[in-house]
Image (tube, rainbow, N blue to C red):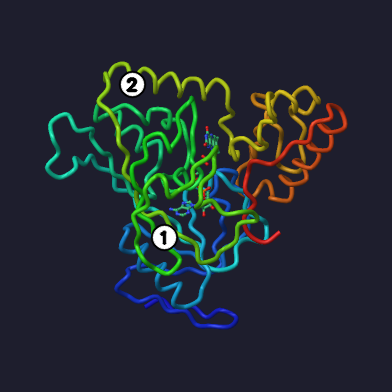
Amino acid sequence: MTRLTGITQTLAVPDELGVRLRRDVALAPYTTMKVGGPADYFATVTSVDQMIGLVRWAQAAALPYFILGGGSNMLVSDAGIRGLVIHNRCRQVRLEQPPHAAEGTQPCLFAESGAAMAGVARQSIRDGLTGLEWAVSIPGTLGGAVVGNAGAHGGEIKDSLETALILDGSGQVVAFQIADLAYAYRDSSLKQRQPLRAGFLPVVLSATFRLAHGDPAEVRARAEGYLAHRRRTQPAEPSMGSTFVNPSGDYAGRLIELAGLKGVRVGGVEVSRLHANFLINPGGVGKATAGDVIRLMEQIQTTVQARLGVALEPEVQLVGEW
Ligand SMILES: Cc1cc2nc3c(=O)[nH]c(=O)nc-3n(C[C@H](O)[C@H](O)[C@H](O)COP(=O)(O)OP(=O)(O)OC[C@H]3O[C@@H](n4cnc5c(N)ncnc54)[C@H](O)[C@@H]3O)c2cc1C
């Protein structure tokens, strides 16, 4: 049993869960931007049973929890996250046919929510399937992608998702169909409003995708084209992806470049010279703060508004205490 004494309570995770609870764990290494303060409590789960057991235990202990996937769609504050951060490494992926599948039935790909979305896409390509190849270039986990309806190159999660198994706020496992998820552009009924804090939120456990048989050479070529496009157009340094939402009919990156902001720096954070809607942290962990990122974002918003009359809205999600 792991016992940890907090300010107000002693927490003990049952031994049979096989989960190690740690205190005051720095979150920066677990995010793609490599900034952010500590989680009060932190645990990694590697199986769906562990995830269900740990979330139910936290619910029973009234300990707010936060699911961390690839940390690629968030900016964690320097003050960090109060409560329990659950690092999701449930990563099984397999091809499934529905029981008694009739000939010609479309194949289903099953994946646990901690699987890398790009890895799920690669597996589908290896299985000769088409429908997920757009995702080969997306960072983060399947869980984060299902929550945010991730998409690229004209494809998105809602195009091929069949069902998602979800652990709800009262600890019940429920199968959600696509209609239950209210999908919209990079949005769903599961997506939380900002700032994101630990709470008693639904957890995506796994998902199945309905795909089609494709021509393996064509599917592979499409996927390689998407990857090559990313390498040409996006920086390789730590970042959060697109920082601001594209204003209607325009591109945030074009406006930031036009305002003369490429290469501008605050602390350890810089506007990428390759793609101006990406803020990069070239030094990695310990060389920049979330405060640097916020100050640079404010400078960009003020300058673009003053020079071009456009109000840029953040796309990245603020997480933790601000
Ligand atoms: C370089 C770069 C390029 C990017 N390009 C794209 C792109 O082309 N298209 C695109 O859509 N996105 C893009 N993104 C953003 C990001 O990759 C996606 O939003 C991704 O799907 C987030 O997944 P994640 O696992 O990293 O989520 P996280 O950042 O870990 O979490 C995001 C939110 O989802 C919640 N969450 C995560 N997993 C679960 C779960 N299992 N159950 C419940 N809640 C959960 C978290 O609590 C949090 O609220 C890019 C990011 C980067 C850094």
Element at label 1 = strand
- The amino acid beneath tag 2 is Arg
The residue identified by callout 1 is 44
Kindly report the distance in space between the C-alpha atoms of the residues bearing marks 1 and 2: 33 Å
* Residue at 51% in and 73% down: 63
Quadrant location of residue 256?
top right
In-front residue for pair 208/52: 208
| Residue 169 locus on image (x, y percent) | 45, 66
Disc 1 crowd rating (10 Å Cα; few below 14, some 14-19, many 20+) is some
Side of 238 where 113 appears, left or right: left
Q: Look at label 1 and name its amino acid.
A: Thr
Instruction: From the top left corner, tell me how far across and down residue 46 is, in percent.
Output: 34, 57
Q: Position of residue 224 (x, y in %)?
A: 40, 21
Where, quadrant-wise, is the N terminus in this rendering?
A: bottom left
Q: Quadrant of residue 296?
A: top right
Q: Which mark is residue 220?
A: 2
Of the two numbered discs 1 and 2 on the same chain, state the one appearing first in sequence: 1
Residue in front for this viewpoint, 154 or 238: 154
Label 1 vs label 2, nearer the camera: 2
Which residue is located at x 67 percent, y 46 percent? 287
From this view, report whether residue 198 is shown above or below residue 154: below
Point out residue 155 in the picture as x, y percentages from the top left corner.
Answer: 45, 29
